[in-house]
Each structure stands twice: as structure tokens, then as C-alpha cells.
Image (cartoon, rainbow, N blue to C red):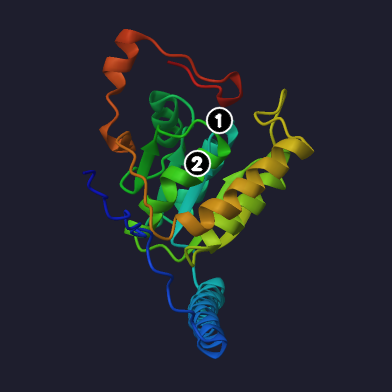
Amino acid sequence: MKKISPPCMKINLSASPRPRVPASLFWMRIIRRRHLLGLGLLGITLLFCGCLLHNTLKLQAASSGSVDAFLVLGGSIRREIYVAELVKQYPATKVLISQGSQDPCILLIFQRAGAPLDHVWLEHCADSTFGNFYFNIPILRRWGVSKVKLITSPTHLPRAKWMAQILLGAQGIWVEVDTVEEQGIPGNQESLVKTGLDVTRSLIWAVLSQGIQPQCSQVKPLAAVDLEAWRQSGFKCEHQGRIEN
């Protein structure tokens, strides 16, 4: 006699459907998230406006003050000749020469002019106009500078001036520009494309530099230059300097 097997029962192993969220609760959650996002954006906007106002007031105060430092952009030995004469008038003002002429050339220029060396520093990290500001702004900040005189040549404008106003201005440092006429082939070749690219990355770095301060390991005082060692190894200065080794 055959045994009759009971019919197999099918068990539905699929997950039970989730309970539907009421439409009113769903929209409340959306509104709440948008509200929090709006508050966050408002907070960021207020913080940005507060920082901008503070920086603007700081710049206004610095504009009427005296110059704390001379920043010389490398590219022509005539700029270093000019600042050496300037230092004789303002011996207590700090000088920062960014990637200028060879060290012994600058030393001989200051010695010939009878200018003091105590507050003159040489920086050799920069390899471009952007680098001039990238590496030297942290140094100026450590010095507590609020107003700087930028020394360059007319052929370097308006690019150098705009970059200085953006990058130094973002740090609350007021900029005055002094230009020194060059002779012969200009040290800087300008173009609209070059200016546009440098101004664009300056705007970006003006924001990033609020939290990033690059350091240059190749900074030394002018008084530390060993002229005799340079004479032994040999050096050559721009003919415009009229310097005899």
C-alpha cells in the first residue's frame, strides 16, 4: 500500500515589505534637511563676511601707516641698486630680496652704496612671480608686516601688482608699488595669457593660504654672504650693476 506524502508547503522567504512612510513625515524630513543645510550655508556666509570685513578694516588701518618692509622681486640688478639707496634713508626697515642677483653682487651693491646690511635677507626658493609671493608671504607674516613696498620694474606690471594686491591683501598686508626703470632686455616678458593664469591661481591661493603657510629653507641674511669664498669659486654680475669683482 503506497504512502501518500503530504503536499509540500511553500514558504515565502522574501523579506516582508517595509511599512510605508506617511507622505507628511517624508516631506517633514526633506524640509528639515533643507533647513539644516540653509543654516550651514548661512553660517559659512556670515563667517566669510566677518573675515572679509575684518581684513578690510585691517587693510584700511595699514594703508595710512608706515612701510614695514621692502619686498624686492628678482629680475634686474637695478632693483637691488634702488633698494640699497632706499635702505640708507630707512635703515630700520627690513628688506627681503626674492631670487635676485647672485649673493656677492647684492653684497657689493650695498657696500658700494654704504647701506646697512643688518635687516636685509635673501630668499632663493622662488622660481617665478607666483613663487615670489608663495614663499615670502609667510616670512612677512612672521615679521609682523602690515604694509610692504613692492619693488619691481614697469615691464612687470600690471601682473605683479595685481598678484601682490590679491595675495598680500588676503593676509591683511597693504601694498605700495615702486618701479625701477630697466635698461636693455626686460627681465620679465608679459602677456595676457600669463597675466590671466597668474591672477587666477592667485585668487585660489588667497583662500588656501589662510591655512597653509609654505616654508623656504633657502633664506639667509645678506651679512652672512662669504665674499671671499665667492671670489674663489667665481661669479658674474649683470653689466648694469657696473660691479668689479
Disc nearer the start of the sequence (2/1): 1
User: Above or below — where is 1 with respect to 66?
Assistant: above
The residue tagged with tag 1: helix, strand or loop? helix
Q: Residues within 10 Å of mark 2 (few under 14, many from 20)?
A: many
Quick check: 80 above or below 33? above
From where the camera sits, is residue 74 visible? Answer: yes
Q: CA distance from mark 2 to mark 1?
A: 16 Å
Farthest residue toward the right? 192
Above/below status of 216 relative to 56: above
Where, by quadrant of the figure, is residue 225 drawn? Answer: top left
Q: Name which residue type carries label 1.
A: Ile
Residue farthest front in this picture: 1
Examine the rendered structure and indicate whether residue 25 appears above or below residue 7.
below
Quadrant (top left/top right/bottom left/bottom right) for the C terminus:
top left
Specify whether 52 is left or right of 2.
Answer: right
Question: Who's the residue at 52% across and 88% down the image?
Answer: 28
* Image location of residue 107, percent across then percent down: 39, 31
Quadrant of the image for the N terminus?
top left
Residue 119 in the image: state x and y as whole percent.
34, 49
Badge 1: residue crowd in 10 Å (few <14, some 14–19, many ≥20): many
**Picture disc at residue 77:** 1
Q: Nearer the viewer, mark 2 or mark 1?
A: 2
Q: Is residue 97 left or right of residue 156?
A: left
Q: Residue at x 37, y 60 (%)?
A: 12
Three-letter amino acid code of the residue under disc 2: Asn
The structure residue drawn at horizontal position 37% and vertical position 44%, both measured from the top left corner, is 120
166 and 186: which is toward the camera: 166
- Number of numbered discs present? 2
Secondary element type, mark 2:
helix
* Residue holding disc 2: 132
